[in-house]
Image (cartoon, rainbow, N blue to C red):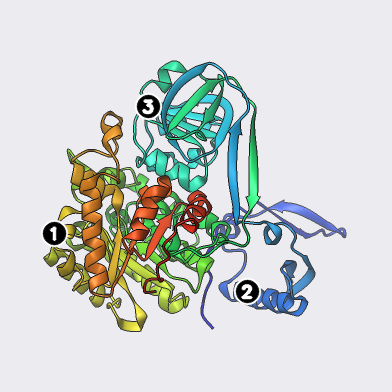
Amino acid sequence: GKDAIIGRTLGSKKVKMVYSSGGGSEIIETNEEERERWSISNDDVLELSKMAVAIEQHYGFPVDVEWAKDGDTGKLYIVQARPETVASRKKQSMKEEYKLLERGDVVTEGRAVGNKIGSGKVRILSNVDEMASFQEGEVLVADMTDPDWEPIMKKAGAIVTNRGGRTCHAAIIARELGIPAVVGSADATEKMSDGDEVTVVCSEGDTGVIYKGSLGFERKEEDLSHLPDIPVKLMLNLANPSRAFEYGQLPNAGIGLARLEFVINNVIGIHPRALLGFDKLPAEMRSKILERTKGYADPVSFYVDKIAEGVASLAASVYPKRIIVRLSDFKSNEYKSLLGGPLFEPDEENPMIGFRGAGRYADQAFRECFELELVAIKKVREEMGLSNVEVMIPFVRTLDMAKEVNDIMAKNGLKRGENGLKVNMMAELPSNVFLAEEFLDYFDGYSIGSNDLTQLTLGLDRDSGLVAKHFDERDPAVKKALKTIITAAKAKGKYVGICGQGPSDFPDFAQWLTEQGIDSLSLNPDSVIPTWMHLANMDDKADDGPN
């Protein structure tokens, strides 16, 4: 067997129950050593897992298991097993539809993200330092968000921003979390006040509307357990390991885009160079890092293990189907927001086209950090046995860059083709289009990043609300670039899929891509069923592409 522990969380463990000297039991406080120690060992976890699987196989249905460990002997006991009746009975293949039942005064409008409706009290935040004031279910209103805001966004009933387009940070995370959001409103923070009751409506097309008051709406579900055949594979865009097993129950052909940034930002929160150069950091920063990395052998092990746990959770949720893990693609301003980031990151006027992707990996200033990601991927594939993990390299500007990154990977035990490892490239730059055939000499296939490809083809900033109306993957210039990439991959018998936002938002665009012969569409979870049903109505059925 494999050491396949895919997640660990060090709890606070402030109290414990012990036998009382007078008989019975009592609750006492734990000491610092006990609080910073894992409750059970890895061997215990694996032994309990074997017991749980044996019980489930015996009864033939999912079970909840309660267990205990003898404080004197260390022996493990199963004390109860009963049928699991929540997650196992939840149907994931559902078509969800929201409908507004009444109208009110319009507060403001913007770009709709998703197709849901949410309501609640407004909470306007100007910066992440105000996080403590935010309450579960409130409507988050802000000028714009960045990765530091994600802990608040998880709690929001809806999100509204002044700035941003369909592919800005707020929009991407809202889709991932299944939260209705309206971006690029221009004046939300001026038009609303803390405590206002509002209803955020994203169910009526591209325009998202914020209405005054808590309006009535209904939510309908349609069971689609028996889906018709479609001429293309649908994969998932996922980044949040905590929701992987929920979304993994949707009909899918695997995960077409797993973003490492979510784990690095939300779970780790520390710049990798700060961990590598821990001994040289200021004392206050070392103290903060030690607090976050409790329970791990050292700060660097914490970084590697947390990435491995995140990737493993995603990979296990769809195993044995493929998962394409895009290695880190933070921009310098995003890395700077991590603990220690300002010590190591440059100030760039336009980080979107700056120090990022493959160019960062090969640079001496970051190469050692990139190698930590490779150690984590190797651990997932070889030690945990999740060989369905493939990697994807983003923002590969030149052929020399493609070769250099492959060489670095090979030196770190991840050689393309060995042990079934596939290395894909994110096709997202004009140079990738012009040299579509040549780049395939270094990669096993393409996953098209239509967000950046559209941005760089049309020459616009996808985070700017001022030009958001011009951002459209269906523009003839973008479609010509897409067709060039698809044709080149098909001619060489290599995989080509797409993981950008377009197919999730526009069913007609998904249909056009299918007609061009693309092998897979990687979609946001809330778009899988609607897109599936749209494609099922196509007249022409094509053969499945290569696996």
Mark 1 lies on a secondary structure that is helix
Amino acid at dot 2? Asp
Q: At 36% from the left edge and 48% from the top edge, which residue is drawn? A: 502
Q: Position of residue 170 (x, y in %)?
A: 41, 38
The mark lying in front, picked from 3 and 1, is 1
Q: Position of residue 89 (x, y in %)?
A: 71, 59
**Residue 432 versus residue 258: which sits nearer the camera?**
432
Number of marks in the rendered image: 3
What residue sits right under mark 1 in the picture?
434
Residue 498: in sight, yes or no?
Answer: no
Checking the image for residue 488, the label placed there is none
The mark lying in front, picked from 2 and 1, is 1
What residue sits right under mark 2 in the picture?
44
Q: Is residue 453 above or below residue 87?
A: above
Mark 3 lies on a secondary structure that is loop
User: What is the distance, in whole Å, between disc 2 and disc 1 at their CAs?
Assistant: 54 Å
Amino acid at dot 3? Asn
Q: Quadrant of the C terminus?
A: bottom left
Residue 374: in sight, yes or no?
Answer: yes
Mark 2 lies on a secondary structure that is helix
Asked if the residue under mark 1 is in contact with the one under mark 2, i.e. CB atoms within 8 Å, the reply is no
Q: Name which quarter of the figure residue 546 lies in.
A: bottom left
The mark lying in front, picked from 2 and 3, is 3
Crowd around label 1: few <14 · some 14–19 · many ≥20 (10 Å): few
Q: Is 532 left or right of 465, judged from the image as shown?
A: right
Amino acid at dot 1? Phe
Q: Quadrant of the N terminus?
A: bottom right
User: What is the distance, in whole Å, between disc 3 and disc 1 at their CAs?
Assistant: 36 Å
What residue sits right under mark 3 in the picture?
162
Q: Position of residue 240 (x, y in %)?
A: 48, 54
**Which one is earlier in the sequence, the residue at label 2 or at label 1?**
2
